Amino acid sequence: MILVFSSITYALKARDLLSRASISSELIRSPRVREIRGCGYGLKLQNDSVESAKTICSASGIRILSTLEDVKRR
């Protein structure tokens, strides 16, 4: 699953917060993310971490614009 943020700054802040909570994430730049928001940055997470990540971000005032399914490229 990919969480979409309004800027790379918020994506980096979220990545650091999640890391402190032992939630692994990967900063990505993707055309799919850019479809939702111009900056094109998001965090890729394991599906079982998404709800916890959303809660942590929300509690810290970091707004998630959208979530995207991570579609594997062939």
Image (spheres, rainbow, N blue to C red):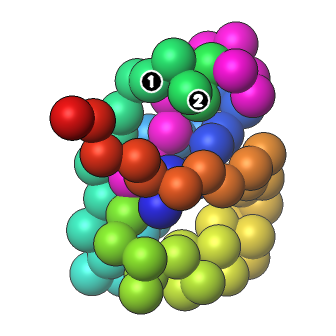
Residue 47 to residue 18: above or below? below
Using a 10 Å C-alpha cutoff, classify the residue at mark 2 as few (fewer than 14 neighbours), some (14 to 19) or many (20 or more). Answer: many
SS of the residue under disc 1? loop
Residue 19 to residue 40: above or below? below
The percent position of residue 62, horizontal first and vertical second, equals 71, 55
Rounded to the nearest angstrom, the CA distance separating label 2 from label 1 is: 5 Å
35 or 60, which lies in front?
Answer: 35
| Span of residues in magenta | 35-44
Residue on which the image places disc 2: 33
Can residue 68 be seen from the camera position used here?
yes
Q: Amino acid at mark 1?
A: Ser
SS of the residue under disc 2? helix
Q: Is residue 41 magenta?
A: yes
The percent position of residue 10, horizontal first and vertical second, equals 60, 39
- Residue situated furthest left in the rendering: 74
The percent position of residue 36, horizontal first and vertical second, equals 75, 28
- Residue situated furthest top in the rendering: 38
Quarter of the image with the C terminus is top left
Residue on which the image places disc 1: 30
- Residue situated furthest front in the rendering: 74
Q: Are marks 2 and 1 in contact (CB under 8 Å)?
A: yes
